[in-house]
Amino acid sequence: MPVIGRWKALLDDRNRFFWVLQAAGWMGYALVQYIGSLMHEMRDVYILIILLGAYAGFLLTVPLRYLYRRIWDSPPWLLVLIVLAAAYFSASIWAVIDNATYWEIYKFGFRPENNWFYFKNTLAKFYIMLSWSGLYFGIKYYQMLQDEKQKALMATSMAHQAQLKMLRYQLNPHFLFNTLNAISTLILIKENDLANKMMSKLSSFLRFSLDNEPIKKIPLAREIEALMLYLDIEKVRFDERLNVDINISDEAQHALVPSLILQPLIENSIKYAIAKLEEGGEISIQAERQADELVVVVADNGPGTEKPSQDLIRSGGVGLANTRDRLQALYGKSYSFTLSSNGPSGMRVEIRIPFEQVEVS
């Protein structure tokens, strides 16, 4: 229904645009004729003849519009023939009306001896009709070109949105599988209270995930809230072994970030750092504004690795590669996503994106 409404509004605008141009064009024609008459010192009554001639041209070109609409999809050669014939026919009628008006009003009822004199100046008016036709087709083709560009932009936008949704929704089954597997393990070892608690946290996290479109950006403060829902789930599994330190500047809290962009990074740290340390470990999340960029750092104190950054992204499962792809789809070349060692041990992920601040009321 909204699509039909948009097309109806577009057609109404096009129709209004035609009548505005039609009126303005023939008023301009009348003005040019009037200026020309000043050079020949015509009587004042000649202004009426000019206005009647312009009005006749206005009326005669209206049927041409509807004719050209009907033949729009005709073969080019047929289209040219019909346009030439229609323009000449309209010019002939216009010449008859113009001459009859001129003789009746300005020449006090003069009548020529030969009726062919009524068609005098037909060739000149034929050129005017051809010019009108050329303008009509030119504007129409330009509008069609704009429509095609709009459709192409819409198709590109829809493909872009579909890509972002696919990347975001890839994470949910991956995370859901891990969490349900942990809940299943808790049930098997008779830890029903913990399993129930974990299921409740999972429900809250999934509700947040469904309430936020993957193609939209949210304030970093809200992203941290969602992250805490996820961490509450993981803390059920790891208890005291999982420590999280969050340090977000006041300005950074209002910065816009892609929805659930941090969760796969934390999940990666838990999988490759916290889970491998018997005594547990710590994950640090920091965010601040630096010039026109928002810098977000996620670091852990796990075993770390000596692999290059790109190899780490490829071997880091769905999360890291997916996060990089989402950032690239959203920001193009205006982002940075790097992995490095976090001394004395562990990994450090740094994200740099353009700083966009949510309006604070």
Image: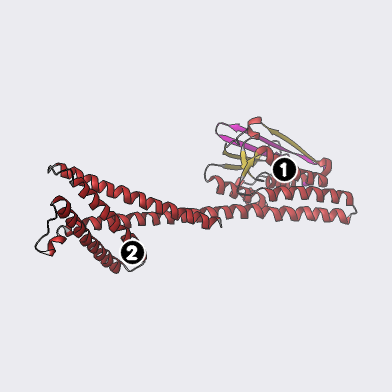
**Which amino acid lies under the numbered mark 1 shown in the image of this protein?**
Leu
Residue placed most toward the observer, 354 or 316? 354
Measured along the vertical axis of the image, is residue 5 above or below residue 47?
A: below
Q: In this view, does 168 lie to the left or right of 190?
A: left
**Numbered mark located on residue 227 in the image:** 1
Can residue 191 be seen here?
no
| Residue 114 percent location from the top left of the image | 10, 64
| Residue 124 percent location from the top left of the image | 18, 56
Residue located 68% across and 41% down the image: 223
Q: How many labels does the image show?
A: 2
Residue located 61% across and 46% down the image: 216
Furthest-left residue in view? 113
Span shown in magenta:
275-302
Residue located 53% across and 46% down the image: 332
Residue placed most toward the observer, 333 or 268? 333
Measured along the vertical axis of the image, is residue 89 above or below residue 187?
A: below
Residue located 81% across and 51% down the image: 199
Occupied quadrant, residue 340: top right
| Residue 317 percent location from the top left of the image | 67, 53
Magenta stretch holds residue 276:
yes
Q: According to the image, label 2 marks what residue?
A: 67
**Which amino acid lies under the numbered mark 2 shown in the image of this protein?**
Leu
